[in-house]
Image (cartoon, helix red, strand yellow):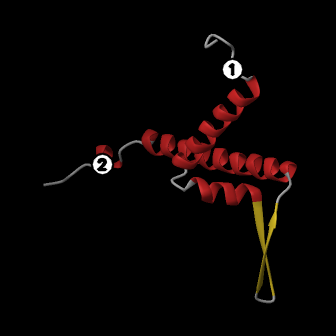
Amino acid sequence: DKSEVPNPEALDNVVSFFYYLLAAALLSIGSEELQEALTSHCVVTRGETIIRTNTVDKAADVRDAMSKALYGRLFSWIVNRINTLLQPDKNIWQVTHH
């Protein structure tokens, strides 16, 4: 019967995957790059590179930290942009002498 309610867990996975792809697109990076950034970390010691897989909890922490950093930078950009637009035009107050 096609009128059955879809598996809620499967639907959650589809929705989560949509937002994952959307986040990658908004960051202008490939989905593979975002996946790597969230699910692994790189340690370089004495010229040797070691890539370790993050736990699910660590990946969630990385996601949250990335979100916080992006939000902070966006907020700062918005405040700076508003301040720039609210500054009076200096040329209005200059008197020219002929």
Q: Determine whether 14 is above or below 70 in the image.
A: above
Residue at left 21%, top 52%? 96
Residue extending farthest front: 1
**Where's the C terminus, which quadrant?**
bottom left
Residue at left 43%, top 41%? 85
Q: Is residue 82 left or right of residue 15?
A: left
Q: In the rendering, at what x and y percent does residue 51 appear?
A: 78, 71
Point out the tag, 1 or 2, that comes first from the N-terminus.
1
Residue located beneath label 1 in the image? 6
Disc number for residue 91: 2
Q: In the rendering, at what x and y percent does residue 77 appear?
A: 55, 47
Q: Determine whether 8 is above or below 78 in the image.
A: above
Q: In the rendering, at what x and y percent does residue 16 appear?
A: 67, 36
- Disc 1 versus disc 2: distance between alpha carbons? 63 Å
Q: In the rendering, at what x and y percent does residue 54 appear?
A: 83, 58
Residue extending farthest bottom: 46
Residue type, numbered disc 2: Asn
